[in-house]
Image (cartoon, rainbow, N blue to C red):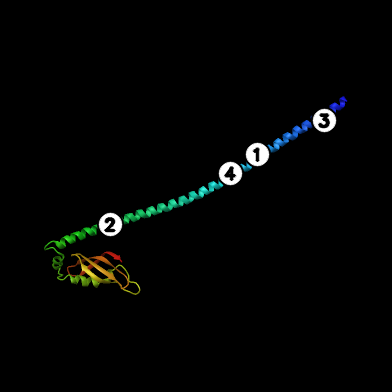
Amino acid sequence: MKKNIIIVLSFLVILLLIFLVVSKNNEISQLRIQQENQMVDHLNQRDLLEKDVKQLEDKLLGVQEKLDENLENVERLDESLVLSKKKLSEYEAINLELEDALRLATEPGFGATYILEQKGIEDYRVLIEDLKEHNEIIGYDGILGGTMYFSDVRNLTKDWAFAFFDDGHYGGYGLYSFEITDNQDIRWKTILEVID
């Protein structure tokens, strides 16, 4: 009987050892599964982060392209501003000349007619007819087979004329300066033209 008890006890100890080993193996397996799950989660999170980083890089690239485009626009606007300031200065100078011409035209003994007479032009209509003969100074071409010509000319001052031009389809107006040579030849120069 003692031998049987020892065998049973030995068997129980072996069973207990087997149970402990199996239990530990289960714990180890569960830990491995947890570690594998954590690793998969980390890999998934890394993939998501990589996708987020890629999207942010793409957005950053888009923002950089927009920024470059805006900088180019600013540079073009700066150039346009410089040109506009230059044109403004030119127009201000023209305005001063016109103010001087108007002052001269209204002063007794110094009017435009008097000054033209001093240059040998007794009738200002000579200027008007002369400009009508110089359609080539109009800075716009006719359309639909039309040819630009001066349709109405006004002598403003001793140096300036204002004229309307058209080709029968469309037209505009302009400001023209003239110079009378010693030979009484008239030379015309376009100052400003605008199409309606």
Label 3 amino acid? Phe
Residue nearer the viewer, 104 or 40 = 40
Quarter holding residue 153: bottom left
Quarter holding residue 115: bottom left
Taking 32 as reference, is 100 left or right?
A: left
Label 1 amino acid? Gln
N-terminal label among 4 and 3: 3
N-terminal label among 4 and 2: 4
- Which marked residue is nearer to the observer: mark 2 or mark 3? 3
Q: Residue 141: which disc? A: none
Q: Which residue is mark 4?
A: 46
N-terminal label among 2 and 3: 3
Asked if 68 appears above or below 124 in the picture, the reply is: above
- Which marked residue is nearer to the observer: mark 4 or mark 2? 4
Identify the residue at the far left of this view: 109
Q: Which residue is mark 1?
A: 35
Identify the residue at the far top of this view: 2
Alpha carbon separation for disc pair 4 and 3: 51 Å
